[in-house]
Image (cartoon, grey):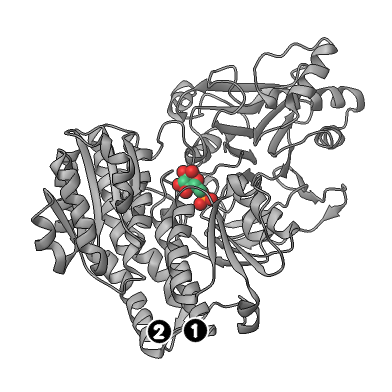
């Protein structure tokens, strides 16, 4: 996690760094800092807490003079959030300053080695160890680039580093491995950043660094090097998002904005892939022969992406008849998975940088499986690592809790299922045509769920449910899979203890917990299973639970006989129904969090991109 940004140009660096960091706060927000070349010295300003504290301390950066600098927003890994542990960190000599995103896995060995040589560290961070190592090498050779190379050769783990040297006031050196880093080309000014939003205001022309690559730049010149130190050319890529896509634009929170962006995100993801009543997955090679040769599909993912995979399992098995398993990427890596060339491993990830998912893809490849990514961020590590990638087209997602990222993942899962079912001849023309029609209508139906009256209805229920400190989400089959994501939303942003169970499993333990003061959200949108789920509603209601039932419009009256409150959603094809069902659940989590005064976009202890194990 953590966000880094660097600037070398002709304007004052500090305000640009702080503004850039404000766009990276989703990556970590427990402390922030900057280091700027000021005459012959470094000006370092850093503080524990939100970026605003640093901004206030430096008058938005205006109190810091200098045109070259680096900045950092932190998500603590080594050492608690504190002023001392905040980046940038200096070498012992004070000549080197660095910002770091990632984790140095052999940090304690390196630290002990240096301590044995008499070095005393000020902080508990792995980053200070790296700064110190670069400093020692630099003192010996007087060559910054060489000092960085010598140092990274000894590092294990992940890093994106931005490095300044006090003797070299114009230049910034940056290097990366397993953590994202982009270079931004400007006119008489250049940038580095962890992610596009940090520099989008200044440039839309970027280069994505690959693992092991280094960039050395000042305001006018830039040189790229490969892992062996050979000069390389990097392709310039143009970012097509608008600046407004990365800003809040009138909404109270990014999460709410992103919930409302779902109709567009769905349109962008689905539209180009449906032509003349057929699914086209351009550039994706899943031939009939290949699909027939498969003995299973394994999904790997984390968090909400894992829950999108849960939906995929139900529908791929039902409609394609291919055995499909889902695994949390963090478990997959260490469970000695049974895979071979007859296995297809599909990684779902919004960011494309989740460390466990990335490693799962690499592990799958090592074992001979073919890999496919369902990814939102173009050029991200997982997109590059996977053999093939289908992009979701959600645009930048900033709120830590994903919303449009999740629904666009579901959209790609439907497209993939439709494509495979058709290729394998497992679906008749009428059903296939119904799927296509349903997908075409999905963005408008999502928009219907976001009309003022519907949102107001959820807001009102949220008011009543805010008082509860415990929640259960229940549902069967695809409803159960969707509930997992609904429950996660509540847990993540509203800090309410929330569990999710397949409704039929309630009696096997969890029912003993239900009493007055519990809220239960029951999702009952599958006609064949409606009576069964409603029976479970009756059971929890009888034990004092406050029940909100989400069901289809035509089943709402029936549901209202048992649940205290009912939200009715429009119906679509059963395969696609999860995409509509999740929207009120997202809104519910959001409004309960707002009512409880939670920091919705930056929930405590979490970060959006989890680039550490
Ligand atoms: C974090 C985010 C979640 C996300 C998960 C996986 O935990 O807070 O919203 O679902 O990471 O992220 P990915 O980028 O791989 O989808």
Question: Is the C-beta separation of discs 2 and 1 under 8 Å?
Answer: yes
Where's the N terminus, which quadrant?
A: top right
Which numbered marker is on residue 432? 2
Which of the marked residues, 2 or 1, is nearer the chain's N terminus?
Answer: 1
Q: Residue at x 48, y 25 (%)?
A: 54
**In the image: residue 524, left or right of residue 196:** left
Quarter occupied by residue 434: bottom left
Q: Is residue 572 left or right of residue 535?
A: right
Give how far apart the Cα atoms at labels 2 and 1 are.
Answer: 8 Å
x, y percentage for residue 500? 34, 46
Q: Position of residue 557 (x, y in %)?
A: 9, 62
What mark, if any, has residue 354 been given in the picture?
none
**In the rendered image, which residue does mark 1 sit on?**
422
Depth check, front residue: 7 or 390: 390
Q: Looking at the picture, does residue 111 appear above or below residue 478?
A: above
**Mark 1: which secondary structure?**
helix
Q: Where is residue 192 shown, x and y percent of the image?
A: 64, 44
Residue at (83%, 18%) from the top-left corner?
113
Mark 2, other Cα within 10 Å: few <14 / some 14–19 / many ≥20: some
């Amino acid at each position: 996690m953590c966000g880094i940004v660097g600037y070398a140009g002709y304007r004052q660096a500090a305000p640009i760094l702080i503004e850039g960091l404000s766009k990276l706060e989703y990556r970590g927000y427990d402390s922030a800092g900057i280091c700027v070349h000021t005459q012959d010295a470094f000006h370092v300003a850093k503080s524990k807490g939100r970026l605003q504290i640093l901004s206030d301390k430096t008058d938005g950066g205006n109190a810091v003079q200098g045109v070259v600098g680096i900045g950092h927003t932190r998500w603590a890994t080594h050492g608690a959030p504190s002023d001392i542990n905040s980046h940038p960190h200096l070498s012992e000599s004070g000549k080197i300053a660095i910002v770091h995103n990632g984790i140095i896995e052999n940090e304690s060995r390196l630290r002990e080695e240096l301590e044995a040589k008499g070095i005393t560290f000020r902080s508990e961070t792995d980053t200070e160890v790296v700064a110190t190592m670069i400093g020692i090498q630099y003192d010996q050779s007087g060559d910054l680039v060489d000092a960085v190379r010598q140092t990274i050769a000894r590092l294990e783990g992940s890093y994106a580093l931005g490095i300044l040297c006090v003797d070299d006031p114009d230049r910034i050196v940056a290097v990366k491995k397993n953590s994202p880093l982009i270079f931004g080309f400007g006119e008489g000014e250049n940038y580095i950043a962890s992610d596009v939003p940090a520099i989008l205001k200044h440039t839309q022309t970027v280069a994505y660094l690959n693992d092991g690559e280094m960039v050395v730049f000042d305001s006018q010149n830039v040189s790229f090097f490969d892992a062996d130190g050979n000069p390389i050319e990097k392709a310039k890529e143009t970012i097509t998002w608008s600046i407004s896509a990365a800003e809040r634009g009138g909404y109270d929170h990014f999460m709410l904005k992103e919930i409302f962006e779902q109709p567009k995100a769905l349109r962008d993801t689905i539209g180009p892939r449906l032509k003349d009543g057929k699914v086209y997955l351009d550039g994706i090679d899943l031939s009939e022969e290949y699909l027939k040769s498969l003995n299973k599909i394994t999904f790997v993912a984390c968090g909400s992406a894992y829950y999108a995979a849960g939906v995929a399992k139900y529908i791929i098995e039902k409609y394609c008849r291919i055995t499909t398993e889902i695994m949390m990427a963090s478990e997959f890596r260490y469970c000695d998975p049974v895979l071979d060339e007859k296995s297809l491993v599909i990684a779902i990830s919004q960011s494309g940088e989740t460390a466990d998912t990335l490693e799962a893809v690499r592990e799958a490849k090592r074992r001979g499986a073919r890999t496919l990514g369902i990814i939102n961020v173009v050029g991200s590590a997982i997109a590059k690592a996977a053999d093939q990638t289908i992009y979701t087209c959600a645009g930048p997602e900033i709120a830590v809790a994903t919303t449009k990222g999740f629904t666009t993942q579901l959209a790609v899962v439907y497209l993939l299922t439709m494509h495979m079912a058709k290729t394998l001849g497992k679906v008749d023309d009428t059903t296939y045509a119904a799927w296509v029609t349903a997908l075409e209508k999905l963005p408008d139906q999502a928009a219907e769920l976001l009309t003022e009256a519907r949102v107001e209805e959820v807001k009102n229920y949220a008011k009543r449910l805010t008082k509860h400190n415990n929640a259960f989400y229940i549902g069967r089959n695809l409803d159960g899979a969707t509930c997992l994501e609904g429950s996660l939303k509540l847990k993540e942003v509203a800090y309410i203890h929330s569990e999710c169970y397949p409704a039929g499993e309630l009696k096997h333990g969890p029912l003993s917990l239900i009493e007055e003061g519990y809220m239960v959200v029951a999702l009952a949108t599958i006609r064949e299973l409606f009576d069964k789920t409603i029976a479970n509603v009756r059971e929890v209601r009888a034990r004092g639970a406050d029940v909100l039932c989400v069901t289809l419009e035509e089943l709402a009256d029936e549901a209202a006989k048992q649940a205290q409150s009912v939200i009715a959603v429009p119906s679509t094809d059963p395969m696609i129904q999860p995409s509509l069902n999740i929207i009120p659940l997202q809104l519910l989590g959001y409004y309960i969090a707002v009512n409880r005064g939670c920091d919705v976009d930056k929930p405590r202890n979490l970060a959006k991109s989890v680039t550490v194990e």
